[in-house]
Amino acid sequence: MMALNRLNHMEYIEGMEAIDSDLMDKVLNYTAAYDYRQYTGKDVEKALAQEQLSIGDYASILSPAAMPYLEEMAQKARSETRKHFGNSIYVFTPLYIANYCENHCIYCGFNCKNKIRRGKLSLEEVAVELKAIAATGLKEVLILTGESRLKSGVEYIGEAVKLAAKYFSTIGIEIYPLNLKEYAYLQQCGADFVSVYQETYNINKYEQVHLSGPKRIYPYRFHAQERALLGGMRGVAFGCLLGLDDYRKDAYAAGLHAFFMQQKYPHAEISFSTPRLRPYINKVDNNPHDVRERQLLQVILAYRLFMPYAGITISTRERAVFRDHVIGLAATKISAGVRVGVGGHRAEEKGDEQFEISDPRSVHQVHQMILSRGLQPVYTDYIRV
Amino acid sequence: MSDQLIIGGHAVQSRLILGSGKFSLQIIKAVVENGGAEMVTLALRRANLGGQENILDHIPKGVTLLPNTSGARNAGEAVRIARLAREIGCGNFVKVEVIRDTKYLLPDNYETIKATEILAKEGFIVMPYMYPDLNVARSLVNAGAAAVMPLAAPIGSNKGLCTKDFIQILVDEIDLPIIVDAGIGRPSQACEAMEMGVAAIMCNTAIATAGDVALMSKAFKQAIEAGRAAYLAGPGRVINNQAEASSPLTGFLED
């Protein structure tokens, strides 16, 4: 039951733009009907024999019946990855420019009730950080903020993007969901890629873990990628926070969300991230529960086999050995030289981090690792025209 | 006997055009040398000028660069990327690629014609990548293309000559070099295309995904040369094993 004093999480609040879209109903209907216990080894074998996996095949390779087939899935995934991406591995880094947040999400270190050091970089500090990152040779940067329109408004983010455009060929943003015109504005400023993660697609669970703040409004977040594409963004990233709810259903929904989006917007560049719950300051026991490395790999491989043309980014939340093995196999993009506090690439961090990272390696170290695995580090694969 | 391929007034001996985007930059030189390629395509978006792992630093000198416009979703974007390529010194050749489907990466023929027309007028030697359609190929000729590059199968699929009959129509009807651009998966398929009268083969994934990339490059070179020679030689007759009618059908004719 929803507490009476809380917002109805399925209703837009003032200022949130509603677009006409059937994608949410489609994804939620499919996900509601997904009973992964009904699949058998035979279904998985049939799926793995397909050249192009159907939605039903995707459902079966995400099921428990697929666990004994992880090696076969990996073999097929590796070949698909090679076909579509060659041996290219894209390298980037995130830059957190602020960690103020208006949401109370019980799984996140930035949540507004958590007592951490808050901070926001001035534009001068943003420039210093960007310069320091550019000096490592990177050409792609992902700009992040906590979710606070008050403290980190769209114009502030736009100015940061404009600064980034001086040094980087590829700029992504991972910020709170925006209205269409705001996405168009940030695209004009120089950002072309937008990441928004639904965290969980289960409406009831979503309501329980997003206690307050604008993030509580489920459909506004769900439709963010579509608004971004309508606003002129070139690529959109999807994902769920594995370990928050039933990871198979959440991964199934995230895959379908991306799949239907590409169907509706064939030009859209699609990518996935696969974050798992991580401990954060004041909550060291925030763990991914039943999503261990085997389960995580199953999800990553399932995304690859279902949508072989999609990019997959592997998070610094995972340990180095896991990351090293998953690139080339299914993942195509890896972060390097990561700081998840506010700033910290050049000057001291101005705010605490969102979560603990597991792979602190520098850009140079990650570069060497990619080469040592017979893969090709790629710094730029995008021209803004 | 001189058997040169002429593209936009430029003569090349090698009929293997290599892609460069799917394998390690360190081995580009060996792949080019083994394949005897004189022309190498590169995605301009991969050029990291002055930066790390810049593809342009790894393509051997003396090779003709064929920058492509990958990443372009419409004619306008393709034109801008082509101009950028020329500005940074990639020469006048350009492979026009306009794709607005991230799943199959099939070319948009309509936008490709538009981009070809604009770029040809600006003095580029335009080699458009296209879905094999005779009407489109004719429009590309009229737009000023220097060659026509039909796909044999979807990019990266290694599926071979799926569009064989339509490519043959282009070979028969279009008075420009027809260069098969995508989908060739094995040297035997490249050989078969060359036997059909295709002028050259553009190859990337088939070589990049091979166990020994440099050796596969050599295999393609040899297959393409064999196919070309067979085309020039004219194929011998194929014995028809079907029984022939016992009474001739033309026996009624007066001498």
Image (cartoon, coloured by chain):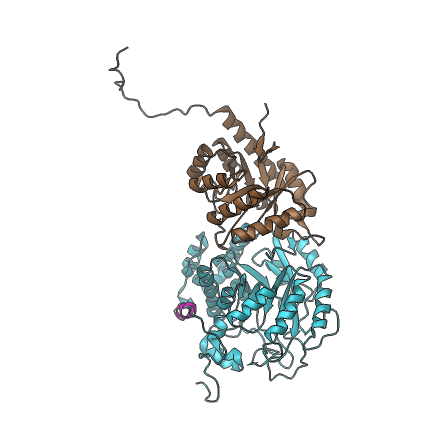
x then y, percent, for residue B173: 44, 33
Q: Is residue A363 visible?
A: yes
Chain B shade:
brown
Q: Which quadrant does the C terminus of chain A fall into?
A: bottom right
Vertical side of A81 occupied by B122: above or below:
above
Main secondary-structure element of the magenta-colored stretch: helix
- In the rendered structure, the answer to whether residue A232 lies left or right of residue B253 reads right
Task: Please indicate, yes or no, whether residue B182 appears anywhere in the rendered image.
Answer: no
In the rendered view, tell whether residue B20 sits above or below residue A61. above
Q: Which of the pair A239/A287 is nearer the observer?
A: A239
Quadrant of the drawing holding the N terminus of chain A: bottom left
- Residue A214 falls left or right of residue A96: left
Is A206 situated left or right of B1 in this image? left
Q: Residue at x 54, y 61 (%)?
A: A234
Residue lying at 54% horizontally and 30% vertically, measured from the top left: B226
What letter labels the chain drawn in cyan? A
Q: Is residue A133 above or below residue A216?
A: above
Residue A176: image x %, image y %? 56, 74
In the rendered image, residue A326, in percent from the top left (x then y), is placed at: 59, 59
Occupied quadrant, residue A65: bottom left
Residue B39, image quadrant: top right
Magenta region: A22-32
